[in-house]
Amino acid sequence: MSDAFELIQVGELAVGFSENVLPDTDQLKGKDIDIFFEDGSTIKYIFHDKHSLTWESSDGSGDEDYRATCSRRNIFLVDFVKKDLATSVSIVLDFVNDIATVLTGSLPGENQAREDKLTRMEKGLHQTAVDVSFRHGSINTKFTTDTPKHETTSELVGKRVRYVYSENDTYEHIYLTENLYTWHCLTGIEKGMADTDLCHYFKIAENLYWFVWREKLVPTLGVVIVNLEEMKTTGKIFGYESDDFNKRINFPVGAYAELINITTFGDC
């Protein structure tokens, strides 16, 4: 590997990362789902068929193309990008507990993306300019103080997991802390490259986790559900297709997982 740094655009990963994706599911077809959030707001999702939905809220409405996968019985990951706003929306629909967690994400503009990391640190900002927000809600019933939520978790911390996205694309993740992880490309066009980025973990069920990461060098939002029972992931990556900040790409990803080791730190 050359010592020179090679910038890999997000769009270049789309083909290799999509080889081992879970199949799209049509189990949501014909369903109308109301999500009642903690703050009292609501949003309705009308699933017309396998790939088209309508959302309605007090802020407006829209018709979108979506993708849904089933990571475990009655637990779905729904994903789409709003056509008008270029906003990424990812939803964990958990019909086991009749709850949902909604992730809204957005990419930085060109000026934000090119702002150097030292300047961002001096402003008290995260090194990544990719923005996210999480909202917890109840499905088809009012949210109350007794409503459970998908809670943040540290259960992945200390685990080192290898992910095989395709015959040619293999990465490892080292989950360092509750907000940081390291990715390292073992095979593929990013071979030998690695970085440490901001991340978020939520526990969906036993051995089922929602893992979200935000890269700082090339603006990227990654969203996957990691199933450590079936050792499989499902999700997506959202970023700029090339060095043109007017072209976004949102593509499915999936990998077979292998737990390499677990590091424990005791009380230190």
Image (cartoon, rainbow, N blue to C red):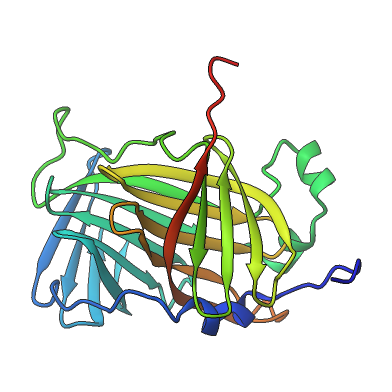
Residue 197 pos. (x, y %): 64, 49
**Residue 38 picture quarter:** top left
Q: Is residue 178 left or right of residue 34?
A: right
Residue 212 pos. (x, y %): 47, 53
Q: Is residue 248 left or right of residue 69?
A: right
Please determine whether, in this image, residue 48 is positioned above or below residue 78: below
Q: Is residue 104 left or right of residue 246?
A: left
Name which residue lies at 65% across and 76% down. Answer: 188
Name which residue lies at 26% across and 78% down. Answer: 24
Furthest residue to the front? 260
Q: Nearer the viewer, residue 136 or 257?
A: 257
Decide if residue 43 is in sight here: yes
Q: Nearer the viewer, residue 204 or 37?
A: 204
Please determine whether, in this image, residue 34 is positioned above or below residue 153: below
Decide if residue 107 is in sight here: no
Please determine whether, in this image, residue 218 is positioned above or below residue 93: below
Furthest residue to the right? 3
Q: Is residue 194 left or right of residue 239?
A: right
Residue 133 pos. (x, y %): 45, 48
Residue 66 pos. (x, y %): 31, 76
Name which residue lies at 29% across and 41% down. Answer: 150
Position of the N terminus, as image quadrant, is: bottom right
Please determine whether, in this image, residue 57 is positioned above or below residue 65: above
**Residue 80 picture quarter:** bottom left
Name which residue lies at 58% across and 47% down. Answer: 174
Q: How many marks?
A: 0
Position of the C terminus, as image quadrant, is: top right
